[in-house]
Image: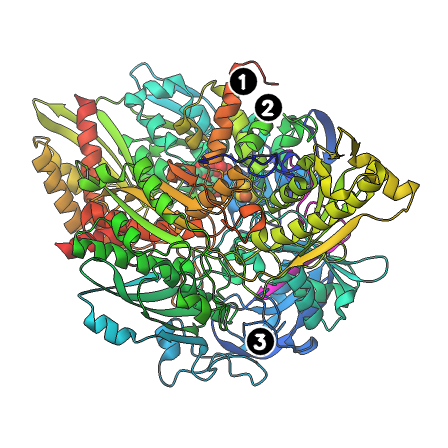
Amino acid sequence: MKIQLELNGDPHYVDIEPGESLLSLVRRLGAWSVRSGCDVGDCGSCTVLLNGRPVRSCITFAAKAQGGSVTTVEALGTPQALHPLQEAFLEAGAVQCGYCTPGMVLVAYDLLTRVDDPSADHVLRAIAGNLCRCTGYRKIVEAVRLAARRKAEGRWR
Amino acid sequence: MAVGTSKRSVVGHNVTKVDGPSLVCGRPKFTMDIDLSGSLVGVILPSPHAHARIKSIDTSAAESLSGVVCVLHHGNVSRIAHTTAGQGWPEPSPYDTFLFDNKVRYVGDKVAAVAANSEQVAREALRRISVEYEVLPSLLSVDAALAAGSPAIHDETDAEGIYDAAGNVAAAVDIPVGDVAAALAQAEVTVEATCEIPYSQHVPIEPHCTVAYFDEDGRLVVRTSTQVPFHVRRIVARVLELPLHRVRVVKPRIGGGFGVKQEVLLEPVAGALALRTGKAVRMVFTREEEFVSSRTRHPMKVRVALGAGKDGVLRALEMEATSNTGAYGAHALTVLSNVGSKTLPLYNKPHDLRFHGRAVYTNLPVAGAYRGYGATQGYFPLEVAMDQLAERLQIDPVELRLRNHIREGETSPIFERIGEGREGVAQIVRSCKLEECLRLGAERFGWREKRSAPRQRGPLTYGVGMACAMQGSGITGIDMGAATIMLNEDGSFRLLIGATDLGTGSDTVLAQIAAEMLGVPVEKISVYSSDTDFTPFDVGAYASSTTYVSGTAVLRAAQEVRSQVLDVAAAMLRQSRDTLEIHDGRVHGSAGKSVSLEEVGHRAAYVVDQHHIAATASCVPEESPPPFAAFFAEVCVDRETGLVRLERMLGVADCGVALHPRLAEGQVEGAMAQGVGHALFEEMVFSERGRCVNTNLLDYRIPSSTDLRSLEAILVDSYEPSGPLGAKSIAEIGINGPLPAISNAIYHAVGVRLARAPFTPGRVLRALEGKG
Amino acid sequence: MRLQGVVRYHRARDTEEALSLLAGYEGRGALLAGGVDVARSPRRDVEGLIDIAGAGLSHVKLTERGGLLLGATVTLTELVESRVAAQYCGGVLVETLSLFSAAPLRNMATLGGAVVSAHPWADVPTLLVALGAELRWTDGMERKGSLEGVYAGAFRELFRNAVLTEVRLPPCDGGFAFYKLRRSAADVAMLNAACGLGVAQGRIAWARIALGATPTRGRRLPWLEELVQGEVPGAELWEEVAAQVRAKLDTGDDRRATGEWRRKAAGPLVARALAQAVERAR
Ligand SMILES: Cc1cc2nc3c(=O)[nH]c(=O)nc-3n(C[C@H](O)[C@H](O)[C@H](O)COP(=O)(O)OP(=O)(O)OC[C@H]3O[C@@H](n4cnc5c(N)ncnc54)[C@H](O)[C@@H]3O)c2cc1C
Ligand code: FES
Ligand code: FES
């Protein structure tokens, strides 16, 4: 079947399998940042924003994206021009292996879109569904709060 | 947060992780992030039985399925005994594994493999393979395996290096020093603790994955998520009967390893399927397969007996370990040895010691390397026993550690007696800031106040506990790491390393060492790591070796390149090279004269006396300086439900000079997080038939953010004279602390000793009721 | 994605279309709301998926008497963020759903999906049973029934050929509280309890007590409700509750906890939920 969607601002009209996952679709379309850690909705590493809200793409049917927009970290920044949130992740040491990072960044992005100055507790709860095995989360929380401060200073896109 | 500062310009600073910008942007850096259209998908048929002989196998229905290209099983591959443990050569683990065997030894063991042009077809083909099994009695516990009359799990005649195959003992160790029995008998006080750790899994968020294909010259290329690319090359070549030089192993970024990717699991299968089909083959473990068919921590029961004087100083120390290695002996001997070798030297006062133990085969999943590598299993009872001793003698637990722990300039007979599956090497501890760790940690944690009285609020009781640990830095006399550095004509450098960054940040730390020595910022060092065709040899990422061993190799290569640079600069400046210095990207001479590295590079490449400025250096460590750490935990125990909540976890560590403090803290924090998982949540549960039943991340719980509300690492100032720029290791030690610290904290709170991990609400309640 | 073998994906515009599509598949079709459970299902016999997210079932309305009308495809996030839902019964709905996994799943999962999936460990059934929810569904005819009654029957069979359209929550005149014991914050329950009661003249006038993940799906404990009715709430009663639950509750093992532990922990859990409900009722 064919669906129409916007991926990171680019319109696509693509053929999908009726039972295909959004994870498989966005990777086929070149969003390599979206990666599987379990494929059944338990880890959060495949998180994308669907119509502005984080969802787990491995258990989202691609067909659900019909007429909608999908955002992945590819839309935030590039290695040469990082988004302030990505910058904060690096500065705080929130990236170790980096496998969970794209999902984590998107969940944090969603939080900061909604809440200006989240407490540490608020951040902990917001990222609670995204598993990271490397960091112990402390530096991820620091990164999100650092980014919130930058946002308050008007450094945000 | 780091205490203390550094005078150096690159090391000791939190430079941007060299792979950070691309990782945080999600660039395609991982094994599976390449266009795989056209490649075949490989999948493995797992054994449904814990122990069975394969009487016959019929693959015709699978082969006739459209899209199936190849089916491999014991009947159509060579039988070559090997070990999947990626270790140095000669390998200390027994050769008890075959690509496919006519016997299966645990639920999840490999029976056959299929390559097909889609995953769906491949999995359908698996369902169509019919296998006739002769089911054998399954030995689902160490006791069952050791019982008289039990069948031998490894009854094959072509296995090598098994300690006692008929008795199901993969490995055994007995190292007496002095006469521990007599010393225990004479000691004024003795305490004993026996602690048990169950099956648990590493759970890297990226599962094992491999792509095998042929390059334009017909060489087999294995792009794989591994910690040990050079061992993968050796083992794949052996199993597939290829000359080593026909195999190239490429390690892209890895999504976590923690030891489970020190195992060579998918690579030989993918390689065999690629060889047989002539096509590219990709394989990825599902999360379920990751649990069932990859590797685990060695479940262990470890007993510790301490003898001490009334002053709390230890006089006797005995440790006995019974390790379950599962169906194969990967790391059986070395993990077992490490239980003693990485723990006993910490308290070096007793002259009478003994470490003994066995690693036993069972029909359960295969254990392997896991961060901490035995030390984690050893510290649990050791530090619980120390807590018991402190209580008996009414000495504060911190004070008791201070009276007993090893100091700078001291040694322990254990260093010499227990090595990596063989004799060790004597060494003197040259850096040990454990006392500072203990004092600073106690102060930051508020130890004295919190320890004096457990707080109580309704059914909740708060308690605090602590523990200490050490580890090593590489394997003395065995590990080897090498590095190549080349000057580009624009004054930048290429650093080629076989060392394997599995998320630890070692590429960054090694670049920092090179940058520091060559007087340039890290951005001027392009790091290329882990490709057996292009980078020098390195044993890989394990045993906390990379910073210390590979780092020393980088340091040496940088010194050599620096010297070559100085030769050229001396000629350019017409000054003696002895007076030259490199910093800020320039070689500075006397009288304010200098040349840039770009000018040096340009001249060497194009102008006069052209030559390639480059050097390769290696390091085989002569010692393995231990990092040290003190851990403090605060828990809240719900006496009515048995739920334990971790309020705070603090680790204070001495890793020598922290070359990149933030990355070093991150190692301690991440390792402690895994340790908390061991303590509170993680356990693989098996059915009566030996099948792991909690094979997903909903049922097998690893810590999530809210479980670690306050988890913090602090590094103390230290300097290791034998290490590169003063550094030793940090990656493993953090995992050793939480189990005993949390067990001790629960005891402080509610007066029950939890000796079986994890400390689930059910176990806590039962213990509370037993107390009455 | 565990589900394999799907050949068609439909978007139903209304329940009627959904029903007729469903009928056409003769058992080889499945309704899809958020899709969380459908995607995780190991089934291989589903050929057609019928997406009902756009079938006009996502309303959240307060009735005049203070009850709630909830469309079956309203997502849990929509409920958590709904002002209307927050007003209902001291916010117990929002309180419960905030303990539900994490935002990305709440953004996907629907109330109807949770009701129909009815995982034994799920929180939604326990709460809704305690609240006395009523369901509306259609199988060609508009039908209604209490959630409890539906769960007591062959409801899985029922929803193979019917579309759940609405969950109705009655006006709430007492205090309700929801408690969940879990290993870890983003975890599903090892035990959950929803308790509601009304207090008159210092005594418990009525009580509704549901316990879930025992390890079976949330259900009421009528004998316990009777036991507390007419009693004076307080520490003494809670102790009695805990003791009785321990003596009488039927529990079992699952992958998260043992039956033995459940029997011991359920009492204090119910007692705590009751104590909190009393505070809210006052
Ligand atoms: C990781 C994870 C954590 C979870 N944590 C919790 C938790 O903490 N607490 C909790 O309570 N639950 C929890 N759940 C379960 C969750 O409630 C359900 O998975 C979810 O609500 C299903 O909703 P859905 O809309 O995605 O259902 P779908 O997958 O779309 O549908 C589920 C089933 O219901 C049927 N169905 C859906 N809508 C209708 C309808 N209107 N009429 C008839 N049939 C219908 C479908 O055919 C299917 O059989 C968790 C689930 C996961 C995966
Ligand atoms: S891969 Fe989607 S949640 Fe794990
Ligand atoms: S950084 Fe490795 S899983 Fe999070």
Specify whether B215 is left or right of B646.
right
Task: For ligand 3, give the image quadrant.
Answer: top right
- Same chain for mark 3 and mark 1? The answer is no
**Residue at mark 1:** A151
Which quarter of the picture shows residue B535? Answer: bottom right
The segment highlighted magenta reads B25-45
- Residue type of the residue flagged with mark 2: Pro
Cα distance in 3D space between marks 1 and 2: 8 Å
Which quarter of the picture shows residue B62? Answer: bottom right
**Residue at mark 3:** B95
Q: Image height check: is C209 above or below B397?
A: above
Q: Answer yes or no: do the residues labelled 1 and 2 have beta carbons within 8 Å?
A: yes
Instruction: Please tell me whether mark 3 sits on a helix, a strand or a loop.
Output: loop
Q: Chain of mark 2?
A: A
Of residues B731 and B597, which is closer to you in this image? Answer: B597
**Residue at mark 2:** A84
Is B40 one of the magenta-colored residues? yes
Q: Any atom of ligand 3 within 8 Å of the CB at mark 3?
A: no
Cα distance in 3D space between marks 2 and 3: 52 Å
Which quarter of the rendering shows the C terminus of chain B?
A: bottom left
Q: Any atom of ligand 3 within 8 Å of the CB at mark 2?
A: no
Specify whether B505 is left or right of B291.
right
Instruction: Please tell me whether mark 1 sits on a helix, a strand or a loop.
Output: helix
Task: Tell me where residue B501 appears, x and y as whole percent.
Answer: 61, 49
Q: Image height check: is B366 above or below B5?
A: below
Q: Residues within 10 Å of mark 2 (few under 14, many from 20)?
A: some
Task: Tell me where residue B158 appears, x and y as whole percent.
Answer: 59, 83
Quick check: can you spot residue C268? yes
Residue located 74% across and 47% down the image: B563
Residue located 48% across and 64% down the image: B367
Task: Tell me where residue B723 appears, x and y as whole percent.
Answer: 55, 51
